[in-house]
Image (cartoon, rainbow, N blue to C red):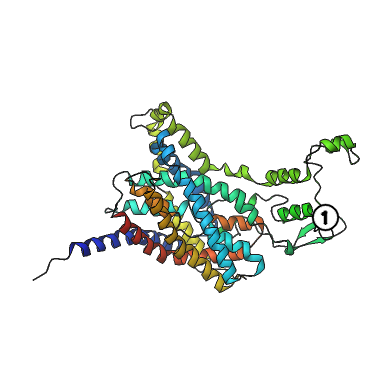
């Protein structure tokens, strides 16, 4: 005789299966990409994966964001979703604090102190959460009800613009190369970078092109120099004997007066500190924020907030419904493409690095185990304080997921752009994504269990 199973046991097994199955699907896609890109077989060359990443970046992902965010967003929703960008800032601040603690405890080489803080603090808020949500909503017994995929993609897309701004401002300057790796050469008092092997676009590691293709090509005359450190040392006057002051005549607006400017004009010039702050702002590549995914987000928000525009583009019987349907067909390629690219990136393996095993383990534990626990507390407290959209499980799931993902792959591209810790970023991202298979499985089970009580 077969005894009936306890309903609680059945429910627990159902939660476990619902949480693990989406990750198994994504893992299968990543393994396929790994096999195709394996250096020994080279079934698909690296150049093909880089072209695929450009398609995702310039076409598939913008289509996905535009369609799902545009259908979901309204003026009321924008006001209700205010905690999503705030949560990105909170998760980043808490992660950076954890990274600082990791750096103090694990004591990485001095040149990697800032790198440890950055890699712990800045998680993947874009492609990986989109892939997870797409896989979760593809599972029949998910706990999110109707509109799962549309709402989930809309929430993730609404958070992306904050993360991108942080990367192009705070992360860009924090990833500045350490001063000790530069030296003054020649009589021109110029700071020169130590020689570095020049590589072509297709010979770069896939890591540098996987999430934001072309970023490594946006190099400027200061992107691989300790620009901020030079400015602050110049202000304090502590480095005049070692590092020369920076010439600001071109930016100061008084270059036309010549080297011997009258005192009257010099008195009208900006204060030294203000002038340097302005130059730092000018050297911040904030203009690169306007890339296809962020442009798609802005267009979707603008059109979605105006009822007339939304009725013309996104309604089922809209005149442009055929256009949005075609975009939705293209958008379906995002999840498999992202996971294939991730598999291709992992196929390159970890690089030799000088970060140290202790620091790598410390970052992984802080980012993938400790930070998600803190995230559960933050989201639960925000819910108790009625700061979240009520009775919306997907909203809470996306907020919690922002604390659970490995470090952003975009950090590898920033490291390459700044010429700082490129091998260390590659190795750390490799091991984080390997370990994330297990940590995400655990926390998805926990999230699904917690959501079942809502």
Work out whether 388 lies above or below 98: above
Tell whether 244 sits left or right of 434.
right
Which residue is nearer to you in this view: 9 or 156? 9
* Residue beneath the point at 55% across and 54% down: 410
* Residue beneath the point at 75% across and 52% down: 231
Tell whether 81 sits left or right of 138.
right
Residue 25 in percent (x, y) is at 36, 59
Residue 130 in percent (x, y) is at 42, 51
* Residue beneath the point at 63% across and 65% down: 112
Residue 325 in percent (x, y) is at 38, 37
Which residue is nearer to you in this view: 60 or 354? 354
Which residue is nearer to you in this view: 220 or 96? 96
Q: Residue furthest front?
A: 385
Is residue 79 at least partly visible in the picture? yes
Is residue 336 at least partly visible in the picture? no
Work out whether 269 lies above or below 311: below
Q: Residue furthest bottom?
A: 357
- Dot 1 lies on which element? loop
In the rendered image, the quadrant that contains the N terminus is bottom left
Q: What residue does disc 1 label?
A: 244
């Amino acid at each position: 005789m077969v005894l009936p199973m306890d309903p609680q046991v059945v429910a627990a097994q159902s939660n476990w299966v619902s949480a693990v199955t989406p990750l198994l699907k994504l893992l299968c896609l990543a393994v396929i990409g790994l096999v195709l890109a394996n250096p020994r077989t080279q079934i698909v060359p690296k150049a093909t994966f880089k072209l695929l990443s450009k398609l995702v970046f310039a076409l598939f992902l913008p289509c996905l964001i535009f369609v799902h965010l545009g259908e979901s967003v309204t003026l009321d929703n924008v006001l209700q979703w205010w905690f999503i960008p705030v949560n990105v800032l909170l998760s980043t601040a808490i992660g950076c604090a954890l990274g600082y603690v990791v750096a103090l405890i694990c004591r990485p080489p001095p040149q990697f102190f800032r790198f440890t803080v950055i890699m712990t603090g800045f998680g993947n808020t874009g492609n990986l959460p989109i892939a997870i949500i797409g896989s979760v909503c593809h599972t029949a017994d998910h706990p999110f009800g109707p509109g799962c995929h549309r709402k989930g993609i809309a929430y993730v897309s609404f958070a992306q613009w904050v993360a991108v701004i942080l990367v192009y401002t705070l992360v860009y300057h924090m990833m500045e190369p350490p001063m000790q790796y530069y030296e003054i050469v020649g009589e021109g008092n110029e700071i020169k970078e130590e020689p570095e092997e020049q590589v072509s676009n297709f010979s770069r590691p896939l890591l540098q092109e996987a999430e934001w293709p072309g970023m490594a090509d946006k190099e400027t005359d200061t992107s691989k120099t300790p620009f901020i450190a030079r400015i602050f040392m110049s202000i304090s006057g502590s480095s005049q004997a070692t590092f020369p002051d920076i010439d600001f005549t071109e930016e100061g607006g008084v270059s036309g007066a010549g080297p011997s400017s009258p005192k009257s004009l010099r008195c009208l010039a900006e204060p030294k500190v203000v002038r340097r702050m302005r130059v730092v702002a000018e050297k911040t590549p904030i203009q690169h924020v306007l890339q296809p995914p962020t442009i798609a987000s802005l267009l979707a928000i603008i059109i979605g907030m105006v009822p007339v525009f939304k009725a013309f583009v996104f309604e089922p019987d809209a005149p442009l419904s055929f256009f949005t349907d075609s975009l939705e067909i293209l958008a379906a390629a995002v999840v498999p493409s992202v996971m294939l690219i991730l598999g291709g990136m992992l196929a390159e393996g970890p690089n030799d690095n000088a970060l140290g095993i202790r620091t790598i383990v410390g970052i992984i534990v802080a980012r993938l185990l400790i930070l998600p626990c803190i995230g559960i507390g933050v989201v639960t407290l925000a819910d108790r304080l009625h700061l979240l959209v009520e009775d919306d499980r997907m909203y809470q799931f996306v907020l919690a997921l922002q604390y659970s993902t490995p470090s952003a792959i975009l950090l590898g591209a920033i490291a390459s752009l700044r010429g700082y810790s490129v091998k260390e970023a590659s190795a750390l991202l490799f091991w984080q994504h390997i370990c994330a298979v297990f940590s995400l499985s655990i926390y998805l089970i926990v999230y699904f269990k917690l959501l079942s009580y809502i």
